[in-house]
Amino acid sequence: MDNQKKYTPGILGPWYSLASEFNEIIKDKKIYLYYYCKNRAQDGFDADTLRALQAGNLVKLVDAFVREGVPRKQIIPVGHSGGATVVIEAMLKKPKKIASVIATSWTVSGQKPWKAKDSQEIKRFAARYKNTDPLNALVYACDQDEFTSYEDQEFWNEVSGVDFVKLAGNHVCWFNLFNSKHEILRVIKFIQSNLD
């Protein structure tokens, strides 16, 4: 993108903006933000198997960037919805390979109204995350999310190393992240803390 053209930050989405327009204020480093969104099983895989494959592929992608000379700490996977679960699972399984993640609208369930198994899935993941080493994650939840709302995700407050933030709106409320200077600063501070 030609930075000389008039451009409204955030018009292509907050993560694109953070990685492109705002990189000069993050220690003059190029920040690689890999955005991932995927949910539910497909192609004959159950959900856990599919997530494990996707988490493994994410680790391989990060390794490929590192082989190209990108410092590992400058690669921050960003996951939305089912992709939020994938980036957290990847970090949980390979913490030396993925140092930090940003997750928005985390979910392992279908759209509400939930079936009994959806509620059980959230409890299963919550129990795992609470009983693990600290996760270095910035997690955003939308208060009116039609999949998994902020209230459904309050377990993040009990997970060590997680900065859990409530946003107003539905499943894609994070898209308005850059309307808040406070949230821009929060994300930049999170990234900077991982570069030190």
Image (tube, rainbow, N blue to C red):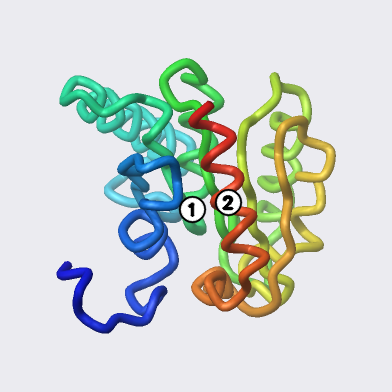
Q: Residue at x 33, y 74 (%)?
A: 12
* Relative side of 147 to 134, left or right: left
* Relative side of 155 to 51, left or right: right
- The numbered dot on residue 119 is none
| The quadrant where residue 61 appears | top left
Q: Residue at x 77, y 59 (%)?
A: 152
Callout 2 secondary element: loop
**Residue 151, percent from left and from top:** 81, 62
* Residue 188 or residue 88, whichever sits in front: 188
The amino acid beneath tag 1 is: Gly
**Which residue corresponds to mark 1?**
82
* Residue 180 or residue 130, whichever sits in front: 180
**Residue 134, percent from left and from top:** 70, 25
- The numbered dot on residue 108 is 2
* Residue 39 or residue 3, whichever sits in front: 3
* Relative side of 110 to 182, left or right: left
| The quadrant where residue 114 appears | bottom right
Are circles 2 and 1 on residues that touch, CB within 8 Å?
yes
**Residue 130, percent from left and from top:** 77, 31
- Depicted 2 relative to depicted 97: above or below: below
Q: Residue at x 39, y 71 (%)?
A: 13
Callout 1 secondary element: helix
| Quadrant containing the N terminus in the rendered view | bottom left
* Relative side of 165 to 33, left or right: right
